[in-house]
Image (spheres, grey):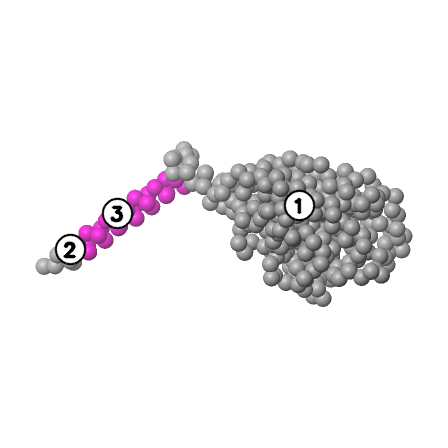
Amino acid sequence: MPSARQGLGKGIDRQRRARHAVTYRFSSRFRKSPMPTRHAIALLACTLTACTPLGQDARPAPDRPIKVASWNMEHLAERSGTGCRPRTDADYAELRRHAAALDAEVVALQEVESKAAAERVFEPARYDIVMSTRPASDRQGACRGLPGQAIRHQAVGFAIRKGVSWTRNPDVSNLALGNPDLRWGVDITIKGTTPLRLLNLHLKSGCNSGRSPTDADCPVLFAQLDPLEQWIDARAASGETFAVLGDWNRRISARSDRFYAEIDDGVPAGAGLTIAAGETQATCKSRYREFIDHIVTGTKATGLTVPGSFEEYTYGVPEDRHPSDHCPVSVRFAL
């Protein structure tokens, strides 16, 4: 005669088998039936929304942090075979694949000839493109090592995924110091529970560190400090959540960097800055371990940065096959 425990065990087994049979019969009917059930509808909703990773065409869910990236695209031209990085149609296709893999809602772009050039990588059906309104300069310098090729207009701008709400603010034209060959800053606001103000810049090259009085580039870069600090201080004074990102052409994370110390002075209150990369070392190029592409956050934006979310996207191919001489950097904000 079975014990009470054995009888209980058999009863549980019978219940399990019964539940399994019901589940099997339901799943069989679900596979065969053309009529949607409550469960089928729920499963479909799950499939189309939060139960699958967001793809290129998806809208950011309210609880998903927004990914903001910066990418210097190295002389991205409108037409194949032109500029200081002449590309084939296949090269543009490769850039589109990397843009999809980067999978950012907002990408600050540098070294892009025009909106049409940006749209060759960021398809207009999927992204809003906003570019600097700086007039094209008359600069027609020869490209180093490329006889017959001439440098094209260089502008900064943003690619913003469709579905992300944003507004444009006036360009920061005084970053050019009145020089038609220097880049303007592009200023946008990403709307959300907490609006995020973003300034995309591309500062003067040739003064990555130090401040040599005999170097013609350093005085220009340091002259750009004033308009940059004015923008930062104005945002902090008005209590805005902001970040400055782009190609700074400067190793500002180096200890005691004089350029960064000028803008990170904590005045006014709320202007305390944080370099999103932290102690992370650059790996895009084997010879450089310090970033010159940066995402720098003000006090409020720092508080909304998802911890550990800073990333450097390195293409996954040998360095000599990189599609740009810069690698994108990104961070996520919980807006």
Q: Residues within 10 Å of mark 1 (few under 14, many from 20)?
A: many
Image location of residue 296, percent across then percent down = 64, 51
Closer to the eye: label 3 or 2: 2
- The magenta segment is 8-31
Q: Pick whichever, 107 or 91, lies toward us.
A: 107
The residue positioned 55% from the left and 40% from the top of the image is 194
- List the residue tagged with mark 3: 18
Q: Is residue 306 in sight in this rendering?
A: yes
Quadrant where the N terminus is found in the figure: bottom left
* Residue 232 - label: 1
In terms of secondary structure, where does tag 2 sit?
A: helix
Horizontally, residue 181 falls left or right of residue 271, namely right
The residue positioned 63% from the left and 46% from the top of the image is 268
Quadrant where the C terminus is found in the figure: top right
Q: Residue lying furthest top in this view?
A: 35
Determine whether 36 is above or below 109 in the image. above
The residue positioned 62% from the left and 44% from the top of the image is 236
In terms of secondary structure, where does tag 1 sit?
A: helix
Image location of residue 292, percent across then percent down = 70, 57
Does 120 lie within the magenta span? no
Q: Earlier in the sequence, mark 3 or mark 2?
A: 2
In three-dimensional space, the C-alpha distance between marks 1 and 2, rounded to whole angstroms, equals: 75 Å
In three-dimensional space, the C-alpha distance between marks 1 and 3, rounded to whole angstroms, equals: 67 Å
- List the residue tagged with mark 2: 7
Q: Residues within 10 Å of mark 2 (few under 14, many from 20)?
A: few
The residue positioned 66% from the left and 41% from the top of the image is 234
Determine whether 107 is above or below 125 in the image. below
